[in-house]
Amino acid sequence: MDRLSPILVPDIGDLDEVDVVEVLVATGDTVAKDDSLITLESDKATMDVPSPQTGVVRDVKVKAGDAVQEGDLILTLEVDEETTEETPEVAKTPEAPAKPPPAPDVTVVEKRSVSKEAEPSGAARVEPSPAVAAPPHSVTASAAADFSNIYASPAIRRLARGLGVDLRQVRGSGRKRRVLAEDVQAWVKKTLQQPSSSGVFALPELPPVDFSRFGEIERQPLSRVQKISGPNLQRSWLHAPHVTQHDEADITDLEAFRQAHKERAKSEGFSLTPLAFIMKAVVAALREFPRLNSSLDKDGDAVVLKNYYHLGIAVDTEDGLIVPVFRDVDKKGVFELARELGEVSKQARARRLRPDQLRGGSFTISSLGGIGGTFFTPIINVPEVAILGVSRSQRRPVWIDGEFVPRLVLPLSLSYDHRVVDGAMAVRFTTYLSQVLTDIRRLVL
């Protein structure tokens, strides 16, 4: 004869309440004595609540995230009074006439307890003899999708979160397919050895947030440029281990030279900006340090050095940043570069750039000098290995020959791919670049 037995939260010591972190069964599951039903967690420990007897789960009263106290109802268990003390094998024999034949449930159990890789053709259709008990970890098909792939302790969940591992993708090797630390580590190792087509670790998805719950909101669609550049920036950030080296250059003499010639440039229809001089100085530094004018090959085991100097220059437009490429900068003078900068910037803001004007760069410069700021961390334009950020120059006192002298100082920020460029090379590059910008006569040497 069947009866319903309430399963209560056991003694939890001197704690007022504990959290339910995992519900391990669902309505309709067959559990054996000592099978775990739920996992509880306090500030100091976790514990599984075992089933005191064999039976079928009915009416689960708790869910993950609930706080429970000693004596709270967890679930009710349907047990056979005549076979309460028997083993699961005896409890499932045909000699219990009052209980419905369990063959359909056992068939489902067989399907869930054998992996697809190991299951021979037609194995799921072979019903076991009535004397064979369901495996302790067996669950119904409907419940399996809910919790079987994430059967792990809170400590393992914390480990997985720290490593960015989705536990639903990890196959547990513990009892009842419980995920162990070794399983998480093995999954990470396998993923690193067999990277995805994107070449990066899969990021866990961010949970959706309804911001309107907190106040009034307004949706503004991203521009086409932002939709395209956003994934590219994310891919660049994930592919290249970024490091940023900051430095400064005294451009007092350079600015004096520019001021002396800007009227001539204006009369010829263009502006002589500091960026034209910076482009020439960058090429001089790239000649000295060719590693920064390179790319990693597809397999990542060689560096492709480029004997051309095509510089990408970030242009601020209403739709977002666009990076047209200026070819053969080493073969052009400052005036020619300044004229080209003006023309291409106008084309970019008018959306008249050709596709070929956006390809083939070997190094990029992002100049915020016309806006402000001091230092920042520009994102490398992969497959390039470095990018120079330029901020607004400032007049500052500099100690020279025993006295403070007002000098115009330009902040520089070099982000580089640490797989190709090390810190020593990066600081030598910015030091050399600073020297060239300080004494523009170096450009003719």
Image (cartoon, helix red, strand yellow):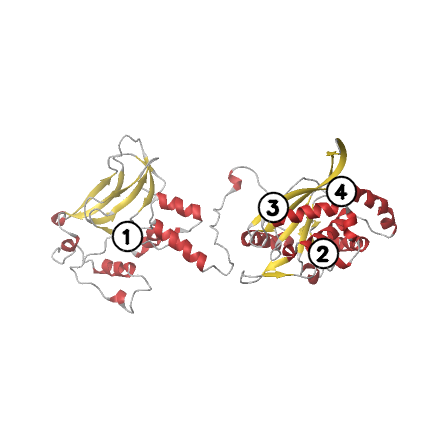
Q: Which mark is residue 66?
A: none
Up/down of 392 relative to 189, above or below: above
Q: CA distance from mark 4 to mark 1?
A: 69 Å
Mark 2 or 3: the one toward you: 3
Task: Give how far across and how far down residue 367 sits, in percent.
Answer: 70, 47
Mark 3 or 1: the one toward you: 3
Which residue is located at x 45 percent, y 60 percent? 194
Q: Secondary structure at mark 4?
A: loop
Task: Give how far across and how far down residue 170 sits, in percent.
Answer: 37, 54
Nearest the viewer among 398 and 373 is 398
**Mark earlier in primary sequence (2, 4):** 4
Which residue is located at x 28 percent, y 69 percent? 122
**Mark earlier in primary sequence (4, 3):** 3
Question: Which amino acid type corresponds to the residue marked 2 in the rendered image?
Answer: Arg
Which residue is located at x 85 percent, y 52 percent? 269
Q: Which mark is residue 251?
A: 4
Q: Which mark is residue 244?
A: 3
Question: Which amino acid type corresponds to the residue marked 1 in the rendered image?
Answer: Lys
**Mark earlier in primary sequence (4, 1):** 1
